[in-house]
Image: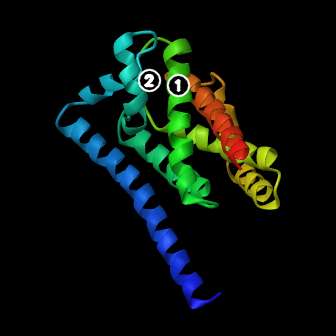
Amino acid sequence: MSNQQGKSLTRELKTQFTILGGFVALMWVLEIVDVFVFRQGLNFYGIIPREMIGLRGILFIPFLHSGFPHLISNTIPFLSLGWFVMLQKTSEFFIVTPIVMLVSGLGVWLLGSPGVHIGASGVIFGYLGFLLTRGFFERNFRSIFLSLLVGSFYGCLIWGVLPTQPGISWEGHLFGFLGGVVAARFLAKQK
């Protein structure tokens, strides 16, 4: 690897770290403010199915959590899967994320169970769906290898799209995953 390639790789990794770190920092700052200032009052900005006011939650849902354990459980997979999304091209993160948020959010709003839906897990499952199906749609060695790698590490998460635990928005997981599939198909068509 030449010195120029090394500098370019370092610059790219710094950019990826800054983007992912910024998202996670925003999640943590909002949760700290929500817990200590608003006493979990910000959570009402999540998605409320079939209520017009609940549509605003599509923008806010990934940044709102029901407490620190919920946020902690979402932080590591968000960072790792988010980085895998960026691995081939950093800019794809900014295409995949809005597609996943929109598909997941609209799916929850239209078909979700009553209550307020919050958390970054819809986006996480969207990244999982994107990464697992990317190899199928792009049909190149790099994408297939990445799909297999992610499947071996995170494939067990797929059960989260089923209604297995009360109080967990499996609808957010399911529609997030489907949003990731849509994003993989969209990006493959662009190429």
Report the number of numbered marks: 2
Q: Amino acid at mark 1?
A: Ser
Crowd class of label 1 (few under 14; some 14 to 19; many from 20; radius 10 Å): many
SS for dot 1: loop
- Residue 21 is labelled as none
On screen, 17 above or below 30? below
On screen, 167 above or below 160? above
Of mark 1 and mark 2, the one earlier in the sequence is: 2
Q: Name the residue located 57 percent from the left edge and 57 percent from the top edge.
A: 86
SS for dot 2: loop
> Quick one: quadrant of the N terminus?
bottom right
Q: Residue furthest front?
A: 190
Q: Give percent across and percent down for residue 62.
A: 43, 37
Q: Give percent across and percent down for residue 178.
A: 65, 31
On screen, 79 above or below 59? below
Q: Name the residue located 49 percent from the left edge and 17 percent from the top edge.
A: 109
Crowd class of label 2 (few under 14; some 14 to 19; many from 20; radius 10 Å): many
Nearer to me, 164 or 99: 99
Q: Are marks 1 and 2 in contact (CB under 8 Å)?
A: yes
Location of residue 52 by image quarter: top left
Q: Residue furthest left?
A: 37
Q: Do we see residue 122 in this rendering? A: no
Nearer to me, 44 or 15: 15
Q: Identify residue for label 2.
A: 117
CA–CA distance in space, label 1 to label 2: 6 Å
Q: Give percent across and percent down for residue 73.
A: 48, 44
Q: Give percent across and percent down for residue 67.
A: 35, 37
Q: Identify residue for label 1.
A: 169
Q: Amino acid at mark 2?
A: His
